[in-house]
Amino acid sequence: MTATLPGSAGSGRGRSATAPASLAWARDLVQPALRAAVDRLDPQLRPVVGYHLGWLDEHGQPVRTSGGKAVRPALTLLAAQAAGGQAQAAVPGAVAVELVHNFSLVHDDLMDRDVSRRHRATVWSLWGDATAVLAGDAMLSLAHEVLLECGSPYAARAGAVVAAGTRELVHGQALDMAFERRDRVSVAECEQMAAGKTGALMSASAAVGAVLAGAAQPVVTGLADYGAQVGLAFQLVDDLLGIWGDPAVTGKPVHSDLRAGKKSLPITWAVEHGGEAGTALARWLARDRDGAREPSDLQEAAGLVERSGARAWAAAQAARRIDQATRGLDPLAVAGGDGADRAEALAALDQLRTLAHFVVDRQA
């Protein structure tokens, strides 16, 4: 297996909705170690986790399905190379963040009572609540086990980065749940929630790669800041897809966030800043909160969000966050030493820019 970076189609500052080659590269590099980690689980939970990760069907038979985009592992491996290290040295960190991410997805599906993810039934809907809790817990425990035993002199520091990111992720999820019980949530509060729920693990994903590469703290901080901005942009785009996303692509019904009454960023902005349309949306959200919403009602609410200017605001905010993230990489171009090492570091920085733009452009 090679850890050589894939070629980049044009400049990393370009824009394309096509998945960057670095995602497949990261999946290929991380997959054997991820499978080896999951193989440690007991016979009851191993097939459940394998199902969630897209390797098995509900009967435990091997299948080929989407196990996710592998954005977080790609951030870890690219950050390691951008910091002047080797991608292979950061594989334990990439495995760890992918396990933490999937722990959060299994628990998130349970809390939201979502019955579909990646075009398949969710874990809780097949095996029940208790099994979903245990499967998520098992992945979280594996994440820290993989890091702590990886043999790197930076293992403890890397573990602390992932643990702190997980704590902030859980805080963001707790805020998200608390918001469901409130009539009004400010945009500032919603951004704080998104910074934890999505931004914290993206930040940790980039930071842990730099840590395992032995990078100096300013480089680690720079890559952590990049990941945090990409995470906020990712959440903004997810929120747009939660209203207007194509079910064939997202695996969820159109208007799913409106159906669930979520206080997402565009919905919150619409209520706070959207004028008459925002006021009408607030009334709509308060009306029949626990009842089933008809497709025509959901279409009406989506129209109010758009007329309020919130759709355009969220798209512009995501683009601004990505611009901030990529500009923050420019000072890191000094990392990576000389010769071939420096060339690889610069190529990794370019791939990080490409990956950041993909996060925004996937809304297309």
Image (tube, grey):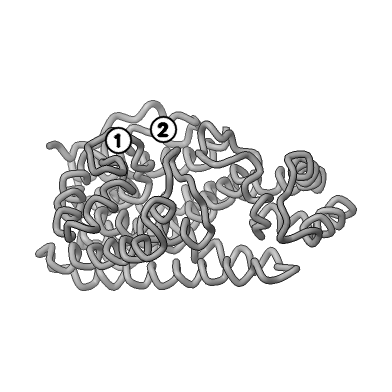
Q: Position of residue 13 (x, y in %)?
A: 47, 36
* First of labels 2, 1 by sequence position: 2
Residue occupying the point 20% across, 48% down? 87
Q: Secondary structure at mark 1?
A: helix
293, above or below 283, in the image: above
Q: Residue at x 46, y 44 (%)?
A: 356
Label 1 amino acid? Ala
Number of the label disc, if any, that sits on residue 24: 1
Residue at label 2?
Answer: 19
Q: Position of residue 30 (x, y in %)?
A: 22, 46
> Quadrant location of residue 203?
bottom left
- Please rate how many residues cluster around mark 2, counting C-alpha atoms within 10 Å: few if below 14, some from 14 to 19, many from 20: some
Spatial CA distance of label 2 from label 1 is: 9 Å
Residue 202 visible here: no
Residue 6: image location, x then y, percent: 27, 32
Kind of element beneath mark 2: loop
Q: Amino acid at mark 2?
A: Ala
